[in-house]
Image: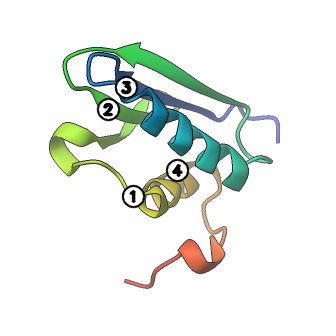
Amino acid sequence: MTDVQRVEIEYCTQCRWLPRAAWLAQELLTTFEAELTELSLRPGTGGVFVVRVNDEVVWDRREQGFPEPTAVKQVVRDRVAPGRSLGHSDRSA
């Protein structure tokens, strides 16, 4: 894959959410090891926990609450590997 597929997880250092962000990063890297070219953790403040794919916000804790890994995998998949099955992580609507 030649396209750059970048995920960024911005987390609140004041809230000590680094372990949560790192765990989610590990989940995404394991699931999308062939599709992602970069994944970064970005320290922030003020209760932020935001997931971006190629600079597009796909999950914001302030609007959607803390994400379940399956939900984040689905929105990331829709942007980096549309049509790909996530196996047991996929839920039918």
Q: Please tell me how crowded label 3 is: few (under 14), some (14-19), or many (20+) other residues with Cα within 10 Å.
A: many
* Residue in view at x 39 percent, y 58 percent: 68
Mark 4, residue position:
76
Q: Looking at the image, can residue 39 be seen?
A: yes
> Could you tell me which secondary element the residue under label 2 belongs to?
strand
- Cβ–Cβ below 8 Å for labels 4 and 1? no
- Cβ–Cβ below 8 Å for labels 4 and 2? no
Mark 2, residue position:
49
- Cβ–Cβ below 8 Å for labels 2 and 3? yes
Q: Position of residue 57 (x, y in %)?
A: 36, 35
Q: Earlier in the sequence, mark 4 or mark 2?
A: 2
Q: Earlier in the sequence, mark 1 or mark 2?
A: 2
User: Looking at this view, is 48 or 35 the one in front?
Assistant: 48
* Residue in view at x 21 percent, y 50 percent: 64
Amino acid type of disc 1?
Answer: Glu
Q: Position of residue 59 (x, y in %)?
A: 34, 43
CA–CA distance between discs 3 and 4?
Answer: 17 Å
> Image quadrant of residue 3?
top right
Q: Earlier in the sequence, mark 3 or mark 1?
A: 3
Given this view, does label 4 or label 2 mark the residue nearer the observer? 2
Amino acid type of disc 4?
Answer: Val
Mark 1, residue position:
68
